[in-house]
């Protein structure tokens, strides 16, 4: 039971206690696609950004006629003021909406696993019992690394309490979303920094040294020469991360590292799509202009764009 529960926990709340690779510690908003943004090689990035990654896979299976028909219906939803034009603000809002859908669908997919009494809320007890099971009563005594699991439980409880804004011990959908995806919520960001420090800080002084910083991403093999990129990371630590030059990264320095100014991918993509399809250069696009460039916005099995078209049904 514990292994099954922990598998679900790791899937849903991996950032709670899993130690990600160094390059994934920086919490940018998720990019819009796993594909490179290179229109010269295809429009898969644009498809993912405009439709959402999962919906883009569906469109890849449609004929051009079906794709254009569905695209026409989507255009009507994007045109919020119903003036017949889609401006940058409307397209930006739509793309951000598709981003948010991923997180909402992730929460909804697993909601019933935790909401045992089906009251559309998740109490801390429901989450704890579902995740850790009857091993709680034994204080993990039968688990080889029981101290790790005790630490995981304590860390989950702390995060749950921070996400629980009204402190009633019960998470609404929004609060549970903050628990699972804390980097998406401003009021959770101090906790994200704290958890990052705890992951890397091996001597428990509340700060990150150069050796701890490097050790989080690189453990040399015996006789191995240090890779060049490690030297580069050491220089980044000294020149960029440790701003007060005391040899350590404190809370504020870690925050500046993992929570930098965000790149608004949705804003950039909205500008890109309008620039590429606005034939009369009025800074707005019409349904006609969009349908004339339908293969930039959506895919189909006849376009030959994107790696997904070469995959089997099972892979998709």
Image (cartoon, rainbow, N blue to C red):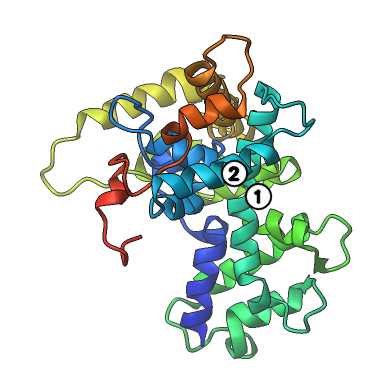
The reply to whether residue 177 is visible in this rendering is: yes
Residue shown at the point (80%, 63%) measured from the top left: 172
User: Where is residue 251 shown, x and y percent of the image?
Assistant: 62, 35
If you read the primary sequence from the N terminus, does the residue marked by circle 2 or circle 1 appear first?
A: 2
Tell me what residue is drawn at x 50 percent, y 70 percent.
Answer: 148
Describe the element under mark 2 as helix, strand or loop.
helix
Place of residue 100 in the rendered image (x, y in percent of width and height, measured from the top left): 64, 47
Residue linked to disc 2:
99
Q: Which mark is residue 182?
A: 1
Image quadrant in which the C terminus is located: bottom left
> Left of 24 or right of it: where is 155?
right
Vertical position of residue 217 compared to residue 254: above or below: below
Examine the rendering and report whether any part of residue 193 can be seen. Answer: no
Left or right, 243 with respect to 44, comes to right
Near mark 1 (Cα within 10 A), the count class, few <14, some 14-19 or many ≥20, is: many
Q: CA distance from mark 2 to mark 1?
A: 15 Å
Instruction: Give the SS element for disc 1.
Output: helix
């Amino acid at each position: 039971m514990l292994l099954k529960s922990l598998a679900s926990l790791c899937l849903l709340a991996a950032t709670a206690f899993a130690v990600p690779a160094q390059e994934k510690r920086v919490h940018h908003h998720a990019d819009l696609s796993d594909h490179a943004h290179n229109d010269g090689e295809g429009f898969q990035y644009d498809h993912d950004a405009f439709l959402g990654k999962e919906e883009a896979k569906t469109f890849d299976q449609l004929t051009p006629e079906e794709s254009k028909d569905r695209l026409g219906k989507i255009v009507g939803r994007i045109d919020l003021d119903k003036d017949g034009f889609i401006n940058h603000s409307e397209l930006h809002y739509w793309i951000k909406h598709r981003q948010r859908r991923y997180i909402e669908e992730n929460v909804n997919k697993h909601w019933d696993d935790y909401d045992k009494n089906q009251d559309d809320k998740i109490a801390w007890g429901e989450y704890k019992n579902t995740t850790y099971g009857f091993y709680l009563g034994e204080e993990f005594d039968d688990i080889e690394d029981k101290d790790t699991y005790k630490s995981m439980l304590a860390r989950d409880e702390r995060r749950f309490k921070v996400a629980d804004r009204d402190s009633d011990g019960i998470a609404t959908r929004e609060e549970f979303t903050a628990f699972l995806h804390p980097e998406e919520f401003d009021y959770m960001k101090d906790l994200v920094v704290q958890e990052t420090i705890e992951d890397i800080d091996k001597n428990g002084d509340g700060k990150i040294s150069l050796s701890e910083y490097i050790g989080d991403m690189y453990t040399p093999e015996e006789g191995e020469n240090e890779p060049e990129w490690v030297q580069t990371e050491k220089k980044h630590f000294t020149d960029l991360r440790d701003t007060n030059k005391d040899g350590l990264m404190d809370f504020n320095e870690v925050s500046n590292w993992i929570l930098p100014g965000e790149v608004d991918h949705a804003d950039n993509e909205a500008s890109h799509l309008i620039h590429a399809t606005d034939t009369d250069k009025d800074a707005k696009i019409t349904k006609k202009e969009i349908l004339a460039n339908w293969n930039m916005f959506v895919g189909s099995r006849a376009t030959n764009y994107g790696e997904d078209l070469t995959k089997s049904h099972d892979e998709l």
